Image (cartoon, rainbow, N blue to C red):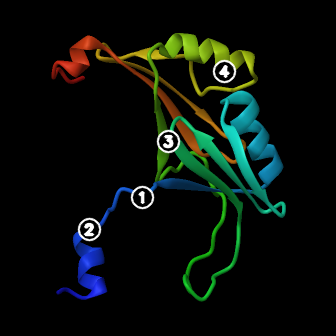
Amino acid sequence: MTDPAQRAASSFPDPDVALTQILVVSDVVRSRDFWTEVLGAELYREYGGTSVVLRFAGAWLLLVTGGDPTEDKPSVTLAPPADPDRVSAAITLRVGDCRGAYDVLVGRGAQFLTPPHDWGGEVRCFLRDPDGHLIELSEARAEAESGSTR
């Protein structure tokens, strides 16, 4: 018989594992309102004014305010993006109609970097949340799905 650590290692990820994207924000209420009112996320839970759990497009999104290192992450400070033009991570939302989604979100107050751009195999555009996290809307076209590249 194997020990618990070996069993856990051989079954990871088990069916109960869920992925949650964490975004560090400067104002959790402002960010919550953006994600729920503009993008249509579902509010799941709020914790003491410092974090919000959202359900969005089948995934979990956790909005948290910044914080100093802790015992389990002793050298890590959480902070919103210092420069929204320097990106190390982004969220992509695959949509069926990029231009249609763009129009809906502009109507809800979203501000995009540019209108949707047609790359042939993909139509895409980008917006930012209130703290500058980059969000991409992407519509795949048939030629992209059949293997062509841009």
The three-letter amino acid code for the residue at tag 1 is Asp
How much space separates mark 2 and mark 4, taking CA atoms? Answer: 41 Å
Residue 76 point in image, percent of width and height: 57, 78
How much space separates mark 3 and mark 1, taking CA atoms? Answer: 23 Å
Q: Nearer the viewer, mark 2 or mark 4?
A: 2
Q: Residues within 10 Å of mark 3 (few under 14, many from 20)?
A: few
The three-letter amino acid code for the residue at tag 4 is Leu
Q: Residues within 10 Å of mark 4 (few under 14, many from 20)?
A: some
The reply to whether callout 2 and callout 3 are in contact (CB within 8 Å) is: no
Residue 19 point in image, percent of width and height: 46, 54
The three-letter amino acid code for the residue at tag 3 is Ile
Q: Nearer the viewer, residue 60 or 98?
A: 60
Q: Nearer the viewer, residue 118 or 146?
A: 146
User: Which mark is first along the chain, 1 or 4?
Assistant: 1
Q: Nearer the viewer, residue 145 or 48?
A: 48
Identify the residue position indicated by label 3 in the image. Answer: 91
How much space separates mark 4 and mark 1, taking CA atoms? Answer: 33 Å
Residue 117 point in image, percent of width and height: 45, 16
Identify the residue position indicated by label 2 in the image. Answer: 11
Q: Residue at x 76, y 30 (%)?
A: 37
